[in-house]
Structures are given as C-alpha cells and as structure tokens.
Amino acid sequence: MLSVRNLSVTFTMYDRGLAQKQLTVITELDLQVRAGQVVAVVGASGSGKSLLAHAVLGILPDNAQVSGTILFQGKPLTSQRSQALRGKEIALIPQSVGYLDPLMQVGKQVSRVAQVCGLSKRQARRAVDRTFERYTLGPEVKQYYPFQISGGMARRVLVSTAVVSQADLIIADEPTPGLHPTVVKETLNHLRELADEGKGVILITHDIEAALQIADQVAVFYAGTTVEIAAATDFPNGKIRHPYTQALWRSLPQNEFIPIPGSQPSPDALPDGCLFSDRCPWVTEACHIERPPFRQVRGAPVRCIHVEERHVSR
C-alpha cells in the first residue's frame, strides 16, 4: 500500500542575517506498509517519525526539499496527489485532541469529514451514527463540544474521523500519551480493528511496549533514518538485530532498565559514517568511514555492518 525508499528531507534555513544553510533532517529513510498491517514507527524525539507522516501527507512547509520515492498503491505520491488523497484515502489521527474544533459539536466535525469524502448529508449522518455506536459513543455525544468530553472519548472521536473517511491508509501520530492504561488499550485495539478490515496503519509512538500489543512490524528510526524493520515477535524472542534496537529494548523498566549512553546527533552535526557510531558498543574503524547500507539480515532489513558476525559470536 505504501512504499517509502531512500527518503530525504532537507530544510532551507536562515543562519545569521541573510545567510542560508541546508539542514537535512531525514536521510535515506525506508518504510513499507501493506494492507491489513500495523507498522509501528518508534524512536527518540527528533528521529523523523512525524516528519515522515508529514511527507506522506504532503504537508511539509514550503522550505522543505524532498528526494527519494514515495509510492501509494503502486503510484508515485506527488504533492498534487497527496493533496487530492489527503483526508480521503490517506487519513491522519493527530497526536493532540486540540486538533478538534472547540467551537463545533463533535458530531458535526465527524459528519463534515464524511461529506468532504463524498457522502451526502444523510449518508454522513448515518455513517457518524454507525461509527459512534461502534466506539461506544452514545447518541448524545454528537451534541457535545470537545471541552465536554473526556480525553478517552476525544480519542475515539478522532479515530471516528478516520473511519468515516473510508481511508485505506491510517497514520496515527502518538495517539496514546498521557492516557489511562485502559484508554491506551482501547485506542490501540481500535487501530488493530482498522487493520483487520484491510486498511494499512502506521502507528507513530515512543512506547515500544504499547506498539508490540498490536503491531505486525516495528520500524526503528534513529537520527532521521531507518536502522531496522523487525517483526513484532522478534522483540520478546530476542531476535532484534541492530545495536540501537537492542539498547532501546534493554532500556525498558521491565527488561534490564539500562540507559543508552550519549545522545542522538543533531541534524547539523551528523557523523560521516554510521549515525549510531558514537554510542555503539560494537563500533570499529570501518563504522566511521561510510554509512552502512540497508540490507537483509536474518529475514529483516537492518543498517549495520556487524550484525551477522555478532550473531555468530553469540
């Protein structure tokens, strides 16, 4: 459904006075999403997760230059095509309930989305009724304004906007932070249901543990690039490959709770070689020479030259 290959995003910015500089924040990023699949995108803040979503949706600012290939259903996703499909075949579930219009009843907001996607007013009302019933939102909720509903209800309203759009690709950008664990599970289950109906779902999150509850695959981003795309089952089974992915997994409280030393490099100070080299326990001189390729290792793409030998040594 969605194929992203060698995606790079560079911003033209002013440095001092009228001097301009180029800041590349995404480099050679790869991702694939199939119908019926949930792909979780995880990584630290600033690793390019939300920028990927904005590139797919075609909502990057005017000072952004994009290179690489983005295909949606086998065809190039140009800026014009993104604009035509946005909200109809590609839908965003934003990370903040602040995206709801505070001056409009939530039922009218969801109905408006349905009408934008081509339904008549009557069809839109029926679609809203069915969707609200599906997500246990009572009929009276349609008359409420955003400030009158709980955070969990607001999340379900946002999911409803994606459902009534009949979009084939759903991008959920950090849909669970700050929510009660019960609401988190409920929100994740809704996303899993959408995938089970044949939609493709991208779940952008910092929470690996939550992502593993519903994801088929997990794409790990670091400093604006993809370092590994692993099956969700590879994590508990100890089959994850890249040293950064392993470090993320060990840093969780229920695992070894070992922090990762150092910090992610800034986009304007990226190393010449492997982007993780300054923090990697496996680093050798070869890691500083050039960027490692994204290659298949033990059934999954990974960006590290030492993965095979480390596996053998164990």
Image (spheres, rainbow, N blue to C red):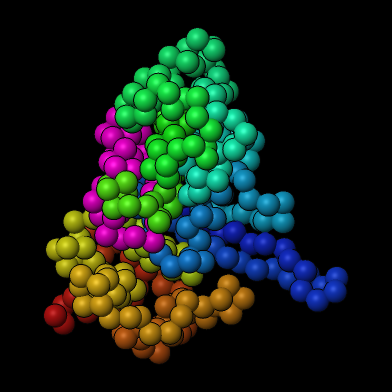
Quarter of the image with the N terminus is: top left
Residue 64: % across, % down: 67, 56
In the displayed structure, 20 sits above or below 77; it is below
Q: Quadrant of residue 118?
A: top right
- Residue under the image location 34 percent in, 73 percent down: 244
- Residue under the image location 40 percent in, 38 percent down: 153
Q: Nearer the viewer, residue 246 or 100?
A: 100
- Residue under the image location 69 percent in, 68 percent down: 22
Residue 69: % across, % down: 52, 49
In the displayed structure, 203 sits above or below 158; it is below
Left or right side of 60 for 295 = left
What's drawn in magenta, residue-wise?
Answer: 186-214
Quarter of the image with the C terminus is: bottom left
Q: Nearer the viewer, residue 228 or 44?
A: 44
For residue 193: magenta? yes
Residue at far bottom of view: 285
- Residue under the image location 55 percent in, 28 percent down: 105
Residue 65: % across, % down: 66, 56
Residue at far right of view: 18
Residue 228: % across, % down: 34, 63
Q: Quadrant of residue 35?
A: top left
For residue 84: magenta? no
Left or right side of 249 for 47 = right
Q: Is residue 221 visible?
A: yes
Q: Is residue 56 visible?
A: no
